[in-house]
Amino acid sequence: MQVEDGKTKEMEIENIVGTAVSEEIQVIGFKLENELVGISIKEIVEITTDKNITPVPKSPEFVLGVMNLRGKIVPVATVKKKLGISENLPENIYTENRIIILDTDFGEVGIIVDEIVGSIKFFEDDVLPEPIGTIGIETRHVKGVVQLGNNELLITLNTKTIFSREES
């Protein structure tokens, strides 16, 4: 309280007790066909391009093969089929590619993407549930959607369901 001319005047104090602060989320955005998709930067080990991929006989259909990443053999997958996105792999996919290396329950796994868009930041409060059946991706693999400033929809992926032991 503040005393002014013998009268008591209360100071305006902003009450911040109980105010929730939304956490900032950072994803790496990329394109799968025409869909803008993002994966949390916390799950990404690195991004690499133009690695030679060696096909592996009798591997699951979504596994393109393996690559040598500084002496470590890393499986490389295409996740479009798992997500329900049509897939047309170019002939040169085994030599010219964009690969995001993820830290999964299976260890490091590379996924092929069509285009790297870059880092995208938004607040946790901006993530909305997927409007069921309205986007072209299997809903069980979607964490949520974010409406970006340019009226583009960012779909955040749940890599735990994509690379779960039940799904493999």
Image (tube, rainbow, N blue to C red):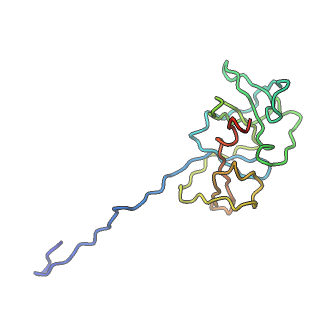
Based on the displayed image, in which of its 4 quarters is residue 126 positioned?
A: bottom right
Residue at image position (71%, 38%) is 166
Quarter of the image with the N terminus is: bottom left
Q: Residue furthest left?
A: 6
Q: Position of residue 53 (x, y in %)?
A: 79, 26
Q: Quadrant of residue 103?
A: top right
In this picture, residue 130 sits left or right of residue 126: right
Is 9 displayed left or right of 35 in the figure?
left
Classify 119 as above or below 97: below
Taking the view exactly as shown, the residue that stands out farthest to the top is: 71
Pick out the residue farthest to the right: 91
| Depicted 43 relative to depicted 16: above or below | above
Asked which quadrant contains residue 10, the reply is: bottom left
Give the number of marks.
0
Q: Position of residue 160 (x, y in %)?
A: 64, 41
- Residue 161, given in percent of the width and then of the height, sits at 67, 43
- Indicate the position of residue 20 as horizontal and vertical percent values: 42, 59
64 or 113: which is nearer to us?
Answer: 64
Residue at x 70% of width, y 46% of height: 30
The residue depicted at 14 percent of the width and 75 percent of the height is: 3
**Quadrant including the C terminus:** top right
Horizontal side of 15 relative to 168 (left or right) equals: left
